[in-house]
Amino acid sequence: MKNFKCQTGHVFLYLYLFSALLFLSSCSDKNEKIKGLLEDVEVIRDVNGINHIYAKNEQDLFFTQGYLAAKDRLFQFEVWRRRATGTAAEILGPREIERDKGARLFKFRGDKKEELSHYHPNGEAIVDAFVLGVNAYIKEVRDNPDLLPFEFKVLDILPEFWTWEVVISRHQGLLENVEDELKYARVVAELGAERAKELYYFHPNEPDLSIPEGIPTALLKKDILAPYKSFRKALTFEPEDVQVAHRIEKANSEAFLAFVHEEEQRHEMYEKFDMGSNNWVLSGEKTQSGYPLMANDPHRLHAVPSLRYWVHLHAPGWNVIGAGEPVIPGVSIGHNGQGAWGLTIFETDNEDMRVYELHPENPHKYKYKGEWLEMEKIFDTISVKGQDDVITTHYYTVHGPVTFIDEELNKAVAVECAWLNPGGAPYLASLRMNQSQTWEEFREACAYNHIPAENMVWADKDGNIGWQATGITPLRKTHSGLLPALGDGSMDWEGFLPIKERPHLHNPENGRIATANENVTPPEYPHQHAIGFDWADAFRGDRVREVLDKAGKFTMEGMGALQNDYQALPARALVPHLLNLSFEDSAALEAKDRLSEWDHNLDPNSISAGIYVMWERKLRDRLRNELVPKHLHNDFGVVKMTRVLQWVERPEKIFPSDSKKMMQEILKESFLEALEELKSRFGEKQENWQYGQENYKHAWHRHPLSDLLAEDWQKKLDMGPVPRGGYSFTPAANAYGDNNSSGASFRIIVDTGDWDKTLGINTPGQSGDPDSPFYGNLFPVWSKDNFFRVPYSKEKVKENAFEKTMLKPKS
C-alpha cells in the first residue's frame, strides 16, 4: 500500500495553513433573517465548506438543512426536480417528452402520511420542513434574480418550487434488475440456458434460465422497456439549450459530445457490477486506539458538483454528521457521537418484467388468474417548450406500470417494482439510523431501509461492530427473477422477506467485517431462495480482508491507505500465465520482463501497470469476441473478470477442443494487441507508457454544461485532468476506462474513541457555485488520495470555522 501517512502530513499542513489564512481574513459573525424559521439557528461553516447547523428544534434543523443545501447546490436541485416531476420537456423541448412520460408513469402515487412516516416517526414533519427550507431559498432567488446561479442564466430558466413528492422520487435510486432481465433473455433465447450459464458468472446458487412459454422471442427483440429506460437515464444538455452568447461553436460541441457519449457507453458496459463500494468495521482489539473503527467509501459516478454533501445536524435529539445526497434530509453515512455507520450495495432484485396475454378485441384488457381485467388509466398533460402540450395516458396492471402494448403479438409488458410500495425512496430511512444509540436500535432502523438494498455496517464507542443486509426482497418460488415472468398470476411474488431476516452479523470472533458488493452471504444462510445471482467480483473485498487480517494494530492512516489501495489481485493471478509464454518480438520481451518484476500495484507512475491494464482490457474483449456473437455484445456486456481467470486456469471449461493451445494463443495475441495500442498512443519507448497520464488513466470531471460553453468557462468549471491509479478491481475502485469517471468522491473514516479524528473527503467541493471558495477546493486533496479532519465537538468546529452566521426568524 502507498505511504499514506507521509502524504497526509503534507496535506494536513497545507490545509492548516490555508484554513488559518481563510479564518483570519474571512471569519466573521453575520446575521440573516429568513421567513419560515421558528427560532434562531446558528450555522458555522468550517474551512472545508461543511455547514454545522445548531438549531433549537427539529423543525428549524431540517428547514435550515434544506435552505443551505439549496443555496449551495440550486442547479443540482433543479435538475433533480425536473427529473422527479417529469417536466424536462418544459425547458428542453420535444426530445424530453419520452423521459417525462416515463417519470410520470413510474411516479409514486401513494398516501403522503403513510409514505413519510415509514422513514421516521416524524417523517412527514421533517420532509415538510426540509421542503419549506428549499423553497425559502428558491423564493429569495426568484425575488432577486442577481442571486441566480450561472446555469439558470445560460439556460434562461428559473428554479421552481418543491413539494414532498420531489424528495421521495425514485428516479435516481439504485434499482434492479428489469433492464438486465431483457438482456439476459435475449442472450438465452439465442444461445440457450446452459451456454448462458457458462458465459455469465451467476452465483452463489444456480438460477433457472427457462424463458416461460407465452413470452415470444419476437417480443424480446423490441424496445419493450422504453419508458423505463427514458426516465432512468441521466439528463443531458444540447447546444441549442444554451443561450447563444455563451454557446461554443456547434462543430466543436458535436465532436466533444460524441466523445462523451462513447465514454458513457464504455462505462455502462464495463461498470455494471464493478462500480461498487467498500466498507468495513474493526473491533477495538484490532485498532491502535482500542476503539472500533469504521471506514466507508461509496462509489458512484463522479459529478461536478459532487453527488454527496457533508452536513452536521445538531438540535435536541439530533447530533449527526456525515453526508448524503443534498436533496434528501438527514445523513446517509456518518456518525452521531455514539455510533458510526456506512453502506455498500447488497445486490437485490427488486423488479420483475411481467408479460401478459391481451384480449383479442381490446388491447387494454389483460388476462390475470383466468379473468380479463381492464388496465387502470391515468390521463396526463406534458408541457413542451416550443409546441403545444402533449396529452398522454398511463396504463397500469395489478403488477405495475405498463411499458409496452403489442397489438401485433397480442402481448403487453409491465414492470413490477417493489420500490413503488411505501418506503421506497432512496436513503430516507437513514433518518432513523441518525438517532440510533445501540446496535439493536441501529438494526431496527435498518429494517426500514428498502431502497437501495445495502450492506449496513455499524461500530460504536461501547465496542460493538455489526453488519445488517437491508433492502426490500420479493420472495419468488416459481422463477429466478433473472428473466421476464408471466403476468397471468402463475408467477406472482409471495410477499417480502422481513429485512431483519436478511444476513447479519454481530461482534464476530475475527474482529472485522468487510463488504465490497460481492456475495458475502454465509453458505449456511437459510433463505438462499431470497439471495440474488448477480454480484460484483470479489477482488476488492478479498484485498480488504487480506490487509485487515494481517497482524498488528490498525490506525486511521492505515485505513485511509487501504481505501486508496492500488493492489490488483487479478494481476497476481494472470501475469504468471503470461510469463510462461514465449515471444520473439523485442518489445514484447521487454514488456514481459517489466511484468516479471512488478508488484501488481496500479500506481500512476508505473509502466508495468500501464502494460498490464491494457493487456487485461484486450484479453476481456478478445474472449467476448471469441465466445459471444457480435450482434449480442450490447446485451451481453463484458466477461466478468472472475470468469476470465477461471477460463485461463482451466480453458477446458469454455473451449471444447485444443483448449490449452487456444487459450495460450488468446493470451499471447491479446498481449501483442495491447502493446500495439500503447505504441500508437505513446510511441515506441516504453518509458512513456506510465499508467497515470492525461491520455491514459486520469481524472477529468466535468460540469454538465461545460461541454457546451466557451473554453474559459470549461477551465473554470471542470476538474482535471490529473493522473490517477487503480481500476475497478482495486480497493481504490477508480473505474475501468481511462477516465476515473466513477469511484469514491466521498470517503469517511471514524475512530469511535475520538470523533474529532474523523477523516473525510468530498470532491470537488461542497458548493456548486464556481465562484465559491468551496467549489473545487477539495479536488487537489482527493486527487492525491488524501483527506481532511472533520470536526464534531463544538470546540473543534469553532477552531475550524470559516464563517459564522446567525439565522433569525423573519416575520
Image (cartoon, rainbow, N blue to C red):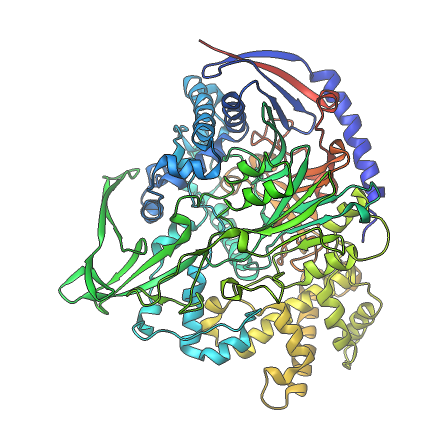
Q: Which residue lies furthest to the left in this view?
A: 361
Q: Where is residue 509 in the image (x, y as percent from the top left)?
A: 75, 56
- In the rendered view, tell whether residue 635 sits above or below residue 804: below
Outermost residue, bottom direction?
657
Q: Where is residue 762 in the image (x, y as percent from the top left)?
A: 65, 38
Left or right: residue 548 compared with residue 279: right
Q: Can residue 72 be seen in this view?
A: yes
Which quarter of the rendering shows the C terminus?
top left
Is residue 197 placed above or below 47 in the rendered structure? below
- Which one is in front, 39 or 33? 39
- Residue 104 in percent (x, y) is at 32, 44
The quadrant of the image that shows the N terminus is: bottom right
Residue 108 on image: x %, y %: 36, 43
Image height check: is 797 above or below 728?
Answer: above
| Residue at screen point 41% across, 70% down | 185
Q: In this view, does 277 lie to the left or right of 224?
A: right
Number of numbered tags placed on the structure image: 0
Q: Which quadrant of the figure has residue 405?
A: bottom left
Task: Tell me: 786 left or right of 258.
Answer: right
688 to the left or right of 64: right
Is 303 or 533 nearer to us in this picture? 533
Which is nearer the eye, 453 or 444? 444
* Quadrant of the rendered image containing residue 623: bottom right
Question: Is residue 221 in view?
Answer: no
